[in-house]
Image (cartoon, rainbow, N blue to C red):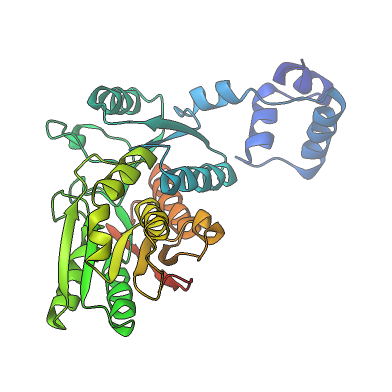
Amino acid sequence: MASIRDVALKAGVGIGTVSRALNGTGYISEETKRKIMEAVAELDYRPNELAQNLYRNRSGVVGFMVPDLEHPFFSSLTKAIEMELYKHGYKCMICDVDRKQSREEEFLEMLQRNVMDGLIAGVDLMTDMDVSTIHRPIVTFDRNWGRMVPNIHSDHKRGGELAAQALLNAGCKRVLQFTPEISSDMSFMERYHTLEQILREHGVEVINIYTGKNQMGYDDDIRIAEVNANYLREVDGIFASDITAATCLRLAHQSGIRVPNQLHIISCDGLPFGRVLYPVLTSIRQNVPEIARACVNAVVKQMDGTRRVPMEQIIDVSFQKGGTV
């Protein structure tokens, strides 16, 4: 494999001149640049990425912490973030926390040791962790890590409004809502609070089923729906995550409950698998590509030294019409 020294000898210039030409720093005449690029092509020279990153005090890696990769929303978001980071020349290191505090702690220590250049976090911050001591770029998705950490999230208030209006338009009088039982200051909780407030203002009864703080993934969501299947005959509307909503749709069919004639179902997230069901899930869709773009842009700007990053960015949601309302 050719080295930068070989390129310099071939072009008849110094190593520093080759380095400046390849990195685009400093003045180099067009003639000298042409000789260097011809030598690069002839020798098939490829810069040592590791060496370059060490020289720049960078790893070329950005971390992404997720609560559970099995969950279809976070698997979709992970793919989108990996693709966006690649566009900016960064690799993605994924950490599936999976309810283990030790994993989160290890990942933050790696960030602190410069193993990663920045971090995008979609998990709750450990109560005993002070991120102000980590002088590396951090961006969160749907989580509050303090006033100095930028947070990107969907317009959950609008999502709650859209879902409530659709259920009201369907004539619902008693709605079952599956909601996480966690702190109300989390941005995604606003969709549940907003829906409940609007429905109650219009005289609709709302029954909340709390799914627990760390209940996430197919097994958890399916179990929660199945345990509460007795409610399906007592309500005429449901608001839940995609997996729980899909499970309720199956349970309704098994019980002879007609959807949407007798039961109206709206899911939140609007992931692609909902469109292969029958009837297709009506959903409040989060814009995963735009969320990924915003997260990556925010962390890249910080890594590049551009500190003017908004502390909060809100991404639009949309109403995805299906056949369950």
Q: Position of residue 81 (x, y in %)?
A: 49, 46
Q: Nearer the viewer, residue 256 or 320?
A: 256
Residue under the point 21% across and 47% down? 211
Residue under the point 52% across and 41% down? 82
Left or right: residue 309 versus residue 82 is: left
Residue 68 quadrant: top left
Residue under the point 36% across and 67% down? 265
Q: Position of residue 148 (x, y in %)?
A: 21, 49
Q: Residue furthest front?
A: 256
Query: Does 324 appear above or below 300?
Result: below
Left or right: residue 276 versus residue 264 is: right
Q: Quadrant of the C terminus?
A: bottom left
Query: Does 102 appear above or below 33?
Result: above
Q: Position of residue 238 (x, y in %)?
A: 29, 65
Left or right: residue 65 versus residue 208 is: right
Residue under the point 41% across and 29% down? 116
Q: Nearer the viewer, residue 67 or 290?
A: 67
Q: Residue furthest right?
A: 42
**Residue 80 in view of the camera:** yes
Q: Position of residue 91 (x, y in %)?
A: 53, 34
Left or right: residue 8 versus residue 227 is: right
Q: Tag count in the figure?
A: 0
Residue 134 quadrant: top left
Q: Nearer the viewer, residue 206 or 22?
A: 206
Q: Quadrant of the N terminus?
A: top right
**Residue 122 in view of the camera:** no
Q: Nearer the viewer, residue 170 or 227?
A: 227
Query: Does 44 appear above or below 311?
Result: above
